[in-house]
Image (spheres, grey):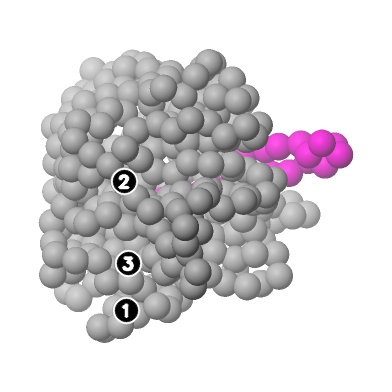
């Protein structure tokens, strides 16, 4: 994460816990964790986003099962405070800041035999069965921390336009994960690697025009995260890091090219990135994908729609095979995603 001149990046252990909400309606504090078991070719991701000033949380559980089914649940449970990351049956607890967290979930998931059906959530919930699910995972950091809060040189917070902001602060870490998935009457003991992130501050999903976010792991000692973000004027922000030799090396340039199916869901990826030390060529193949969406009406009555396609993806780099996500966010304009 490159900090602009005249600013600095701050990250403290207490940032692992919740913050006092800012006095803006769209304050969001979220934690996200993914994990993939390469031996069983399965995995999942979990997100809890507290929106205390709006009175609810965004809770998502997504499990990619070995036979191609996806267990999925999204809810907006009511909350009245921002003191914990616990809502809708999902709990994320910090055991030791920057070192260990736990994720537990007890509730139901929609068991999708055809995950693309989630493009129409109402129809998907009518078509597919909901079954009980339990998740128990322990996450441990295998890398340093990446990111934090960009503040003024004197440490004071930046002034943000809440309508145009995606986060005040954001950090990530490559992790290991071990535990169990129970879906209906099936249980899997899982072990693998993933990436977690945390953010807080004002957020609207429509604040970014499009992005490509690619977290990936090739084992305990090698991983990366490639990010390309675009604004409506076509300006690109390319960033991320490579985890190698026990350290993070910042990405200075990157390209992401994708092939799509008829629904314009990504199927194959070609990724190139460069750090100060070396460059990397990565090939990706989407194993399983679920399309999600976010809708919001502006105060002026304009309807906005964002599509986020969440693909469990197999990656190959330097003779190694790993797994991760390809998360493609696009605003929908005239019925079509805006990204390339």
Q: Is residue 98 left or right of residue 161?
A: left
Question: Would you identify the image quadrant in which residue 64 lies?
Answer: top left
Image position, residue 265 (x, y; %): 52, 55
Image position, residue 249 (x, y; %): 27, 71
Give the Cα separation between the discs numbered 2 and 3: 20 Å
Residue depth check, mark 1 versus mark 2: number of the one nearer the observer: 2
Up/down of 85 relative to 282, above or below? above
Q: Do the residues labelled 2 and 3 touch (CB within 8 Å)?
A: no
> At 62% from the left edge and 39% from the top edge, which residue is drawn?
294
> At 45% from the left edge and 76% from the top edge, which residue is drawn?
255
Q: What stretch is highlighted in magenta?
A: 294-312
- Disc ID at residue 12: 2
Give the Cα separation between the discs numbered 1 and 2: 26 Å
Among numbered discs 1 and 3, the one appearing first in the sequence: 3
Q: Name the residue under label 1.
A: 275
User: Quick one: SS at disc 3?
Assistant: strand
Up/down of 85 relative to 307, above or below? above
Up/down of 12 relative to 239, above or below? above
């Amino acid at each position: 994460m490159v900090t602009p001149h005249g600013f600095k990046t701050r990250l403290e252990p207490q940032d692992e816990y919740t913050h006092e909400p800012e006095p803006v309606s769209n304050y969001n504090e979220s934690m996200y964790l993914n994990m993939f078991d390469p031996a069983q070719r399965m995995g999942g991701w979990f997100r809890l986003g507290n929106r205390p000033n709006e009175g609810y949380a965004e809770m998502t559980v997504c499990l990619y099962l070995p036979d191609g089914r996806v267990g999925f649940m999204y809810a907006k449970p009511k909350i009245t405070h921002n003191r914990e990351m616990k809502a809708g049956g999902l709990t994320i607890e910090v055991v030791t800041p920057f070192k260990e967290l736990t994720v537990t979930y007890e509730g139901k998931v929609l068991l999708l035999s055809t995950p693309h059906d989630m493009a129409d959530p109402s129809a998907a919930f009518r078509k597919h069965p909901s079954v009980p699910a339990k998740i128990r995972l322990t996450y441990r950091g295998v890398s340093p921390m990446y990111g934090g809060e960009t503040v003024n040189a004197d440490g004071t917070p930046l002034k943000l336009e809440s309508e145009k902001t995606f986060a005040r602060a954001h950090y990530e870490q490559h992790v290991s994960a071990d535990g169990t998935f129970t879906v209906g009457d099936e249980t899997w003991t899982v072990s693998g690697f993933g990436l977690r992130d945390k953010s807080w501050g004002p957020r609207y999903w429509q604040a970014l025009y499009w992005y490509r976010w690619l977290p990936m792991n090739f084992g305990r000692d090698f991983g990366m995260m490639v990010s390309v973000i675009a604004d409506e004027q076509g300006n690109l922000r390319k960033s991320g890091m490579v985890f190698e030799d026990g350290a993070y090396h910042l990405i200075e340039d990157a390209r992401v090219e994708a092939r799509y199916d008829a629904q314009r869901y990504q199927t194959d990826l070609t990724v190139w990135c460069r750090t100060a030390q070396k460059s990397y060529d990565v090939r990706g193949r989407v194993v399983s994908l679920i399309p999600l969406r976010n809708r919001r009406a502006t105060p002026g009555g304009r309807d906005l729609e964002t599509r986020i396609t969440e693909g469990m993806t197999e990656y190959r780099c330097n003779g190694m095979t790993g797994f991760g996500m390809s998360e493609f966010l696009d605003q929908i304009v005239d019925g079509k995603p805006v990204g390339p």
